[in-house]
Image (cartoon, grey):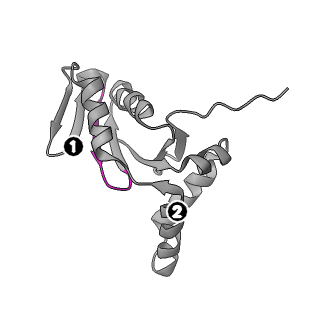
Amino acid sequence: MRTYQLYLIDEGFASHYFGKERLFFQLFKEYEEAFGELKTIIKKQIDFITKPINSFRIQHFLHQNLQKNKSFYNESGIYYLDMGKKGYAQLDIKEDYMILKANGQYDAETAFFEVLRKAEPSFIAIDLKNRHCGWLKPIKERKFI
C-alpha cells in the first residue's frame, strides 16, 4: 500500500524551493524520526512553511469533480475511490495535512491528485516509506530572455 502525506505549502516557499523538493522531503523525514525537543522545533518549522487545509473547499472540489464517478463515496468523513482492478484510494482530510492511501494500479490516487491540484496550487505529496516527493501542480518556471 502506498501512503502519501499531502501538505499545502505557503506559495512563497513553494515558488522559492521549486526544484528542491528533496529539502521538503528531508524536513518531513526528520520530523518523523525525531523525538523530544527536536521534534517540537521541526514541527514549528513545518507549521511556518505550511498552510492549514480548508476542508470545506477540498470537500466541495471532491464532490463537484467526482460525484458522477460510481466508484466515489464518503464514509465517516473519509473519501474513497474503489475502482476494482484499476485501484483503490482513500483520502482523509486533517486540519494541517491530508493522508492518501492507495493500493493497486494508480488510477484512483491519480483521480484524487487531479482534483486536489485544481483546488490549491501548492500541494506537495510525500511518501516517506518509498522516498518519493513531488508537487501535485508543478510550478512553471519563468523563462527570461
| Quadrant including the N terminus | top left
Which residue occupies the extreme right position in the image?
Answer: 145
Which residue occupies the extreme bottom position in the image?
Answer: 37
Residue 16, horizontal then vertical, whole percent: 67, 47
Q: Which residue is mark 2?
A: 48
Mark 1 residue type? Ile
What's the residue at 53%, 38% (across, down)?
135
Image mark count: 2
Q: Nearer the viewer, residue 27 or 140?
A: 140
Magenta region: 87-97
Residue 79, horizontal then vertical, whole percent: 23, 38
What's the residue at 49%, 35% (across, down)?
136
Residue 18 forms part of the magenta stretch: no
Mark 2 residue type? Phe
Q: Nearer the viewer, residue 92 or 121?
A: 121
Of the residues under marks 1 and 2, which one precedes in the sequence? 2
Contact (CB < 8 A) between labels 1 and 2? no
What's the residue at 18%, 20% (across, down)?
70
Residue 118, horizontal then vertical, whole percent: 43, 30
| Quadrant including the C terminus | top right
